[in-house]
Amino acid sequence: MPARSPAIPRKRLRTGALVAFAWAALCAAAPVGSVESGGSDDYIVGFVRYVHWPDEDAARAWTVCVAGLGASERDAHFANERVRNKPFAWRAVEDAQELDGCQVLDLTRADAATRAALLAGSRGRPMLSVGRGADFCTAGGLICLHEPGDERAFEVNLSAIKESGLGVSARLLRLGAAHLPQDGTP
């Protein structure tokens, strides 16, 4: 008689399938290398699906403010994307005074000085700031993308989310790792 493999409980199988499905929906078929090569657009579209802004009904489009990148590839990427029946628009920002009207702040390609200034200008505002690495969360960023090979593709800074006034779906929190604040960090 052949040896039987141990049975996998149905609950664990269902949970695994749900996590895999949710992750695929979040990343919107983003290639694994997109974080490494600098592209965060697919992740941002996925994050917007799971975040709610206090005044989102008044916005005609999801405005993604980007530091450190030219226009050509952003226009092409966001042209056909829609979340909750709203298109995406994007604009370049270099200074914290340009942040009004931004729902998302993409700092994944910004240099250190620009990233620090814009992140400081976004604190306490209903703005989803996305950057690269755990140090971004330690500095007060809301979502920190990790490099391929990390156990989780991103972290969510729970204290900064609370401070921002954004509503975040539990699904997003389950997909990412929670960034727990250290002494003196947001």
Image: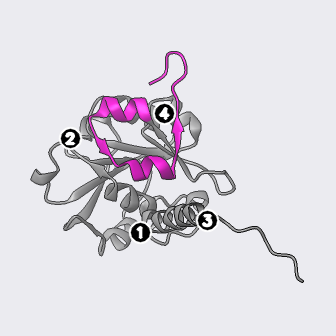
Residue furthest to the front: 1
Q: Amino acid at mark 3?
A: Gly
Task: Tell me what residue is drawn at x 48 percent, y 33 percent.
Answer: 113
Marks 4 & 1, CB-CB < 8 Å contact: no
Find disc 1 in the rendering and name its residue.
Answer: 73
- Looking at the image, which is closer to me, 44 or 102? 44
What is the number of callouts on the image? 4
Find disc 4 in the rendering and name its residue.
Answer: 113
10 Å neighbourhood of mark 2: few (<14), some, or many (≥20)? few
- Nearest to N terminus: mark 1 or mark 2: 1
**Region in magenta:** 158-186
Residue furthest to the bottom: 1
Q: Is residue 89 magenta?
A: no
Check disc 3 and report its element: helix, strand or loop.
helix
Residue at mark 4 to residue at mark 1: CA–CA distance: 24 Å
- Nearest to N terminus: mark 4 or mark 2: 2
Task: Tell me what residue is drawn at x 49 percent, y 65 percent.
Answer: 18
Compared with residue 115, is residue 23 higher up or lower down, i.e. above or below?
below
- Nearest to N terminus: mark 1 or mark 3: 3
Find disc 2 in the rendering and name its residue.
Answer: 100
Find disc 3 in the rendering and name its residue.
Answer: 33
